[in-house]
Image: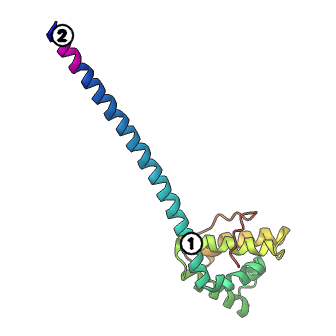
Amino acid sequence: MERKLTILAMLLSVMFVTASAYRTIVTTVVEEEDDSETYQASRREGIRESCREQIRKQHNLVHCQQVLSRGSKLIMLAGDETNAGQLKDCCQQLRQVEERCRCQGIEKILQVQQKQGKLQGRRLREAIQTGENLPNMCRMSPQSCDISVGSGYDGYHE
């Protein structure tokens, strides 16, 4: 009888230790996931801020603003010295911005110009198309941008 009680006590002890270890493992995993999500969100915000700073250093891509506001007219008149110069200056500014930030900069230009009422309707669609193809026209990566212009304005120009 005494031996059965000893075995039962040991069995209960093992079950208790196992249950405690399982609870600790689950808690640890959950905490690591939360830390990872927080880290990822913080990292994404850091990248966005880095891009905004690079764009500011390039004078908010002012030459690209001119190219995009003229849209397809500029491309059709690329032989014109003024237009070719504006496109060249835009490309130089884009080259000074990291590849991962270029599309963000182009998109912000279009959002601001739309918010200011400078681009609407057909002109906006043409400017978006030009913006999507601008990296390709400058012979740089990414080849194209996926531009989404809408209510996503977040204060590109203060």
Which image quadrant is residue 60 in? Answer: bottom right
Q: Identify the amino acid type marked 1.
A: Glu
Q: Residue at (79%, 72%) from the top-left corner?
A: 114
Q: Position of residue 75 (x, y in %)?
A: 72, 80
Residue 99: give x, y in percent of width and height: 53, 73
Crowd rating for badge 1 (residues with CA inside 10 Å; few <14, some 14–19, many 20+): few
On screen, residue 23 versus residue 106, left or right, reads left
Q: Is residue 8 visible?
A: yes
- In front of the other: 90 or 28: 28
Front residue of 11/116: it is 11
What range of the chain is rendered magenta? 4-10
Residue displayed at 27% across by 20% down = 12
Dot 2 corresponds to which residue?
4
Q: Which mark is residue 49?
A: 1
- Rounded to the nearest angstrom, the CA distance separating label 1 from label 2 is 68 Å
Question: Which residue in the rendered view is the most extreme toward the front?
Answer: 2
Give the x, y percent position of residue 23: 37, 35
Between marks 1 and 2 in the image, the one whose residue lies nearer the viewer: 2
Query: What residue do we see at 34% from left, 33% from top?
Result: 22
- Which image quarter is the N terminus in? top left
Main secondary-structure element of the magenta-colored stretch = helix
**Apparent side of residue 124 relative to residue 59 in the rendered image (left or right):** right
Q: Residue at x 56, y 79 (%)?
A: 54
What element does badge 2 sit on? helix
Q: Position of residue 83 (x, y in %)?
A: 72, 88
Picture quarter with the C terminus: bottom right
Name the residue type under label 2. Answer: Lys
